[in-house]
Image: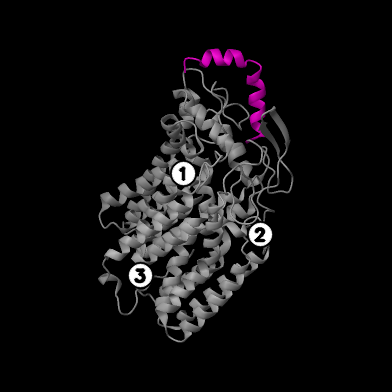
Amino acid sequence: MTATAEVAAPADEPIDAQRPSRWHGWALAAICVLAGALYVWAIGAGQVGNPYYAAAAKSMSTSFTNFLFGSFDPAGVVTVDKPPMALWPQAIAVAVFGFHGWAVLLPQVIEGVAAVFLLHRTVRLWADEKVALLAALILALTPITVAINRDNNPDTLLVLLLVAAAYAFTRSVQSAESRPRTKWLLWCAFFVGCGFLTKMLQAWIVVPGFALAYLVGSSAPVKRRILDLLAAGAVLVASSFWWVALHAWWPGSKPYIGGSKDGGAWDLIIGYNGLGRVFGGNGNRGGSGQQPEMMIYTPNGVQTGPGAMFGGQAGAARMFDASVGGQISWLLPLCLLVLVTVSVAGVLRRRRKLPGNPAERAGWFMWGSWLLVTAAVFSFAQGIFHPYYTTMLAPAVAAISAAGLMMFWRAKSFVRFLLPLGIAITAAWAFVVVSRDTSFHGWTRWAVLGIAAVAIVVLLAGLRRAGLVAAVVAMLLTPAVWSTASAAAATGGGVMPAAGPVQMGGAATSAARCPARTREGLLRTARNSQEGRASRGSA
């Protein structure tokens, strides 16, 4: 983003005069309860989520070394192909409650609800209470977020950590004093570093946008901003790579890092889980149309074979295609309209030399860059790409769409006509997505069109509050139905969680999967498995 616009308060309620009321607290509690119900309903009903990570959680509960490095097997031969931070809460739950599906998945539910709550707190600091409540509701009802929070993949914790980073960043740019401003920026870098230990370089996608937002939105002198960013960079590196260094310098026996060529974490970061995901190669062929060779763990042993082509073809339309569109794209057209409006308004404000709010500007830069850069990386990634990765977009989608809706609704000029336009675009896109498979609650496409038409008429008639309520219902009806249906059917988990009519995986598919790169380490270590077990018996 190159410009900013502020979220205007309604004429009868200046933003400076707003005060939290009791109903705001009850509304937030209701949203969190709704999110918890969607995430927890019938979890572990004969399932353990993704068995690949569930097996690791069980193995990690048996010894400290396995826990520390994320060992896939109890003997500590090889790790999973991700850092272990997302698995640590699951392993602790297994150690306390035993190995059950609900024990593996319960930490995910808690993390998902925490993300909804923390997003509310973050957006409230940036905009106001009503925008924050709407953003929390949107995040809670995002279909792919519901699916992934009912599963044990690492994306749930990644989203929570990145929302925590956004909260710390918002506290930083809104601080008038030097020390708290720097302190919160360092916390922001620390949370992103923890995200790296959850899903490696994917967490760093937001870093350039955060840095740019701090430069344009902080009230500190330019020299102090640069020094703060350098200090935050040091914290980011330290919090991201301490585990990598620990594995490299571990004095005793340690498991082979799954997915790497040489058994080390650094190769996994740069190769299979890093540049390989973006440019292909290194065992990544998902986005190029070629099928990567995978390892399938079955009751009859380890078998190899071609994997599915995940997430559709790479390109500008990937976020809207049949594989991904129903998971995250419901409000993307609205977000793009909001960001264009904000950018134009910011340019006009700058040309007229009107004063602005740097903290508001920083928030738009942060959320806008989070959405646009992440969507661009996911869209054009040539390596393996799963639709559930898009849950990382959900907090930015929620914040931007909520702030944009309220901005359009509160506007006094011709900008107010952008709200009916946004409703029409969102309803039309929902109709297109649902029409791809009308066997799954196809009635919602007509319901959305009807409610959207009512909302537009009511808004044009001057009934602003009723029009806003109808607009929110029209925009969230289909995502809410998809999310509720998936939760009620106890679906969404498995190897590749998804909501909606096409399940991209699930407990009925293969027991687990592991990249072909891991096979090299497994085959080497398997020849000496007895010696490996003996050497790791004391771990």
Front: mark 1 or 2: 1
Front: mark 3 or 1: 1
Q: Residue at label 2? A: 321
**Mark 2 vs 3: CB contact within 8 A:** no
Against 315, is 531 above or below?
Answer: above
Lower position in the chain sequence, tag 1 or tag 2: 1
- Tell me: 308 left or right of 123: right
What segment is highlighted magenta in the picture?
512-539
> Residue at coordinates 58% horizontally, 41% vertically from top-left?
274
- Tell me: 11 left or right of 448: left
Distance from disc 1 to disc 2, alpha carbons, whole Å, reads 27 Å
Q: Residue at label 1? A: 108
Against 460, is 217 above or below?
Answer: above
Is residue 253 visible from the viewing direction of this image? yes
**Mark 3 vs 1: CB contact within 8 A:** no
Closer to the camera, 270 or 469?
Answer: 469
> Residue at coordinates 54% horizontally, 42% vertically from top-left?
45
Q: Amino acid at mark 3?
A: Gly
Q: Residue at label 3? A: 356
**Mark 1 vs 2: CB contact within 8 A:** no
Closer to the camera, 299 or 68?
Answer: 299
Few, some or many residues within 10 Å of mark 2 (<14, 14–19, 20+): some
- Tell me: 423 left or right of 292: left
Coordinates of residue 324 in the picture (x, y in percent): 62, 56
> Residue at coordinates 45% horizontally, 59% vertically from top-left?
367
Against 69, is 421 above or below?
Answer: below
Q: Which element type, helix, strand or loop, lies under badge 2?
A: loop
Q: Amino acid at mark 2?
A: Asp
> Residue at coordinates 54% horizontally, 38% vertically from top-left?
48
Distance from disc 3 to disc 1, alpha carbons, whole Å, reads 40 Å
Coordinates of residue 73 in the picture (x, y in percent): 56, 25
